[in-house]
Image (cartoon, rainbow, N blue to C red):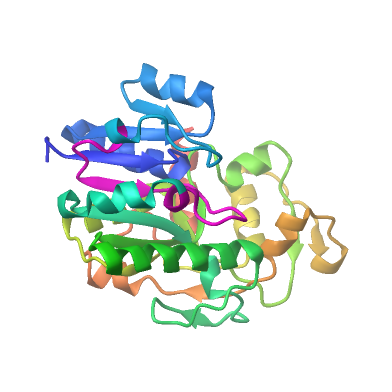
Amino acid sequence: MTSRTLIVFGLGYSARALVDRLRPDGWKIRATARDADKVAALCAEGIDAQRFDGTAPVADVAALLDGASHILLSAPPGADGDPVLNWHGGDIAARAPHMEWVGYLSTTGVYGDRAGGWVDESSELTPATERGLRRVDAETSWCRLRRDSGLPVHLFRLAGIYGPGRNALETVRSRRSRRVIRDGQVFSRIHVADIAAVLAASMARPNPGAAYNLCDDDPAPPQDVVTHACELLGVAPPPEIPFEEAEMSEMGRSFYAESKRVSNARIKEELGVTLAYPDYRAGLAALLAET
């Protein structure tokens, strides 16, 4: 393990959890970030980083990819498609014979709205939002590159992500929480530490072409999570607001365009993952204990 090198395109919140998990085991990490300040901060902590915001190629992509054994693709697609694929798909494909694992972070939004019904990795992809459509296109494009080049691509469809600094406890403390009620609305979630655990398990047992849903065991209405966070903090929950009356941004409203329950059976059965936080109650309790 100590000789392996992970390249992260877009070192954000979820990718950081994986990096922090791997570095103590001797992994070498190289990464890209969107702005110069983030690049400087990564370099200061010993991560070889270059700037990449999707509008131009990485300045020295050969140095970035040299000796890479694993790649994590964490940069979101834009209106013009996947930026990494657009600028560096050929560079990455050229290294296919040397790659052990490539992971693409997607979203459960690719399944669209199921009116609260269950989906698994074999379910039809019927995205209901522009973001979901872009993810389906990106997944399709990376899988096409896998078929054409032999690149060992894996797809990871992430549910709603929470963890340190990004959770219902924080929104309650900052008085930004709301309980928006829409009948039958349920979301699936995943603690960022469990995302890292699933990715690490896949890296240890590659299965190119596989897709995995990353979510916990308990899809739940969003207002239930807010209410529980308030209970943990000993404060009164905010008033309920009917969805039709709630003032929201276009992006905020789009999250309520989909309601589904996502199965995580495959990460358990194929990768042997045991979730550290099988539901939001366990996750929030642990986050509270850490503060």
Examine the rendering and report whether any part of residue 108 can be seen: no
Look at the picture and state if 160 lies above or below 26: below
Q: Quadrant of residue 234?
A: top right
Q: Is residue 22 magenta?
A: no
Q: In the rendered view, tell whether residue 50 sits above or below residue 136.
A: above
Percent coordinates x, y for residue 69 in the rendering:
19, 45
Indicate the position of residue 209 as horizontal and vertical percent values: 28, 69
Q: Residue at 44%, 21% (x, y): give it.
A: 41
Left or right: where 249 falls relative to 163: right
Q: Is residue 236 above or below residue 124?
A: above
Q: Which residues are magenta?
A: 64-86
Badge count = 0
Residue located 73% across and 40% down the image: 175
Do we see residue 242 in this rendering? yes
Asked whether 123 or 147 is in front, the reply is 147
Judge by depth and name the residue closer to the eye, 58 or 102.
Answer: 58
Assess whether residue 67 is covered by the magenta stretch: yes
Q: Nearer the viewer, residue 276 or 58?
A: 58
Residue 118 image position (x, y, % from top left): 49, 81
